[in-house]
Image (cartoon, rainbow, N blue to C red):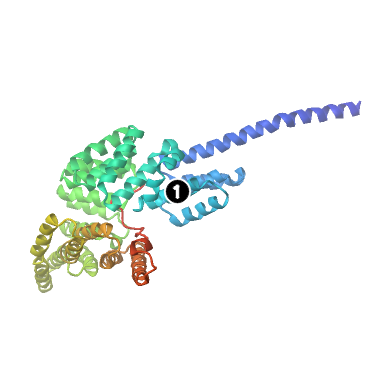
């Protein structure tokens, strides 16, 4: 009797095990699909790559660390701009036998967005097939690359293809807005960013770009409404805080602008245009000592720049330091005297658009005496036309060193070393041409924002 019961129990246990194994497999597959689907959503739709990476890393040990998830993690790090981790994951995937285009695709897109779109352009078909419904990621990286190169014709073609393949894609209309802004077609930019918000009402970056366009058009009330939405519904970045303060200052609310700027943790690290805004706001709010301290930081970076000399002189005047103020106003007048020369060079550029040395030299003079941020823009254009000009690369490196962007500056220094080496190598008749021996700078500051 006992033997019969034992046999029956073993049979039931065996049957339950047979039934339980498929159930466990189904649960496992369901979890696998859920983690992958939610990670994709975080990366591509919710712009939350950090959360996606955390989720993938937490679940990977339970899923035998599938190689497919390595690709998703690389995509997450691509969205974060973490080149070193993307490169490491690409190397691992290549070693594990993942097809070349898939394994390297996150790195190709990252490099394209940084200003090297040629490999994405050459592999556009396979990359669009690989990314499927998220093909906008490929086209977005391509558009950013062309924008950084100053290639407006290719940018326009890529945007046209994007709209044909993915109708009503909010990312396409976003980059159309960025392209229109770069082209200074502000009315078209307004239309594009408004369409982005209509298609994706929670898109904070589109609202920020739209607010910046309104600022450029001096529509301060419209800009203020957008910045108020951003303050309430998104993470307050220094750009949002300073943009909102600029609106308030131009609307006559200097005290409110000053209150906003107090949220900035360390104004000394701000780019010069934003720091100048903080200084101007403090002057308007009768906080002359704070303004004077901030003007000193600006002059430490740019000792001959007209607007910063004027800010410091005005600050000292409010503090009653008349003699020092008058000395700085006199120095500002000397810088102001450079303006006619710059204006003449701008007129020459209009008739000699291919003269990049003229553009570079005009940008250098403008950067030193009149408007550092405006001057560097002209130098960047010259650099993208001729990335192998040593003086241009020196000017770019110097600018970013003064602005505290040391990694970007070092990338330009590395490019300078490559150019110098290539020049020496080219003295050998068997050496390749200089343009084939040097990689273009990979960290030029983008004309467009990344990861909308």
Please name whichever residue, 211 or 37, is drawn nearer the observer in this view of the structure: 37
**Is 411 drawn above or below residue 52 in the view shown?**
below
Q: How many marks?
A: 1
Q: Quadrant of residue 442?
A: bottom left
Callout 1: few (<14), some (14-19), or many (20+) C-alpha neighbours within 10 Å?
many
Horizontal side of residue 54 vs 276, given as left or right: right
Horizontal side of residue 91 vs 341, given as left or right: right
Query: For mark 1, what is the residue?
Result: 106
Please name whichever residue, 161 or 27, is drawn nearer the observer in this view of the structure: 161
Residue drawn where x is 36% and y is 34% of the image: 165
| Position of the N terminus by quadrant | top right
Horizontal side of residue 100 vs 403, given as left or right: right
Residue 217, horizontal then vertical, whole percent: 16, 45
Q: Quadrant of residue 318?
A: bottom left
Please name whichever residue, 386 or 145, is drawn nearer the observer in this view of the structure: 386
Residue 392, horizontal then vertical, whole percent: 26, 65
Residue drawn where x is 27% and y is 55% of the image: 262
**Is 32 drawn above or below residue 82 in the view shown?**
above
Residue 155, horizontal then vertical, whole percent: 29, 45
| Position of the C terminus by quadrant | top left
Please name whichever residue, 216 or 294, is drawn nearer the observer in this view of the structure: 216
SS at mark 1? helix
Horizontal side of residue 147 vs 414, given as left or right: left
Say if residue 452 shows up in the picture.
no
Say if residue 264 shows up in the picture.
yes
Residue 305, horizontal then vertical, whole percent: 17, 66
**Is 149 drawn above or below residue 191 in the view shown?**
below
Q: Quadrant of residue 124?
A: top left
């Amino acid at each position: 009797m006992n033997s019969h019961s034992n046999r029956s129990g073993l049979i039931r246990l065996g049957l339950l095990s047979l039934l339980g194994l498929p159930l466990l497999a189904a649960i496992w597959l369901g979890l696998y699909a859920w983690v992958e689907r939610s990670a994709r959503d975080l990366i591509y739709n919710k712009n939350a790559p950090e959360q996606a990476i955390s989720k993938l890393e937490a679940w990977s040990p339970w899923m035998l660390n599938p190689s497919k998830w390595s690709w998703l993690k690389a995509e997450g790090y691509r969205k974060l701009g973490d080149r070193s981790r993307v490169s490491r994951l690409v190397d691992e995937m290549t070693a594990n036998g993942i097809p070349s285009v898939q394994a390297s695709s996150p790195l190709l897109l990252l490099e394209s967005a940084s200003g090297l779109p040629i490999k994405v352009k050459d592999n556009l078909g396979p990359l669009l097939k690989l990314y499927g419904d998220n093909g906008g990621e490929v086209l977005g990286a391509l558009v950013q690359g062309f924008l950084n190169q100053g290639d407006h014709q290719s940018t326009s073609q890529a945007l046209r293809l994007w709209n044909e393949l993915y109708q009503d894609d909010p990312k396409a209309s976003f980059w159309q807005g960025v392209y229109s802004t770069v082209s200074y077609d502000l009315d078209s930019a307004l239309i594009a960013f408004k369409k982005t918000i209509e298609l994706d009402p929670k898109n904070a970056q589109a609202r920020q770009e739209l607010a910046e366009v309104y600022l450029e058009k001096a529509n301060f009330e419209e800009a203020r409404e957008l910045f108020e939405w951003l303050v309430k519904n998104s993470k307050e970045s220094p750009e949002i805080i300073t943009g909102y303060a600029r609106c308030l200052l131009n609307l006559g609310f200097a005290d409110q602008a000053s209150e906003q700027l107090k949220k900035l943790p360390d104004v000394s690290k701000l780019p010069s245009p934003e720091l100048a805004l903080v200084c101007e706001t403090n002057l308007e709010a009768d906080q002359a000592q704070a303004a004077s301290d901030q003007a000193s930081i600006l002059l430490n970076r740019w000792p001959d720049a007209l607007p910063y000399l004027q800010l410091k002189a005005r600050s000292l005047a409010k503090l009653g330091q008349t003699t020092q103020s008058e000395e700085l106003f006199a120095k500002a007048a000397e810088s102001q005297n450079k303006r006619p020369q710059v204006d003449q060079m701008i007129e020459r550029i209009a008739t000699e658009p291919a003269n990049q040395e003229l553009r570079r030299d005009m940008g250098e003079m403008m950067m030193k005496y009149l408007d550092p941020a405006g001057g560097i823009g002209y130098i960047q254009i010259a650099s993208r036309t001729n990335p192998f000009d040593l003086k241009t690369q020196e000017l770019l490196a110097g600018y970013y060193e003064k602005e505290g962007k040391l990694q970007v500056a070092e990338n330009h220094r590395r490019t300078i070393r490559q150019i110098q080496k290539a020049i020496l190598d080219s003295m050998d008749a068997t050496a390749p041409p200089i343009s084939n021996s040097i990689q273009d700078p990979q960290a030029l500051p983008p004309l467009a924002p990344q990861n909308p």
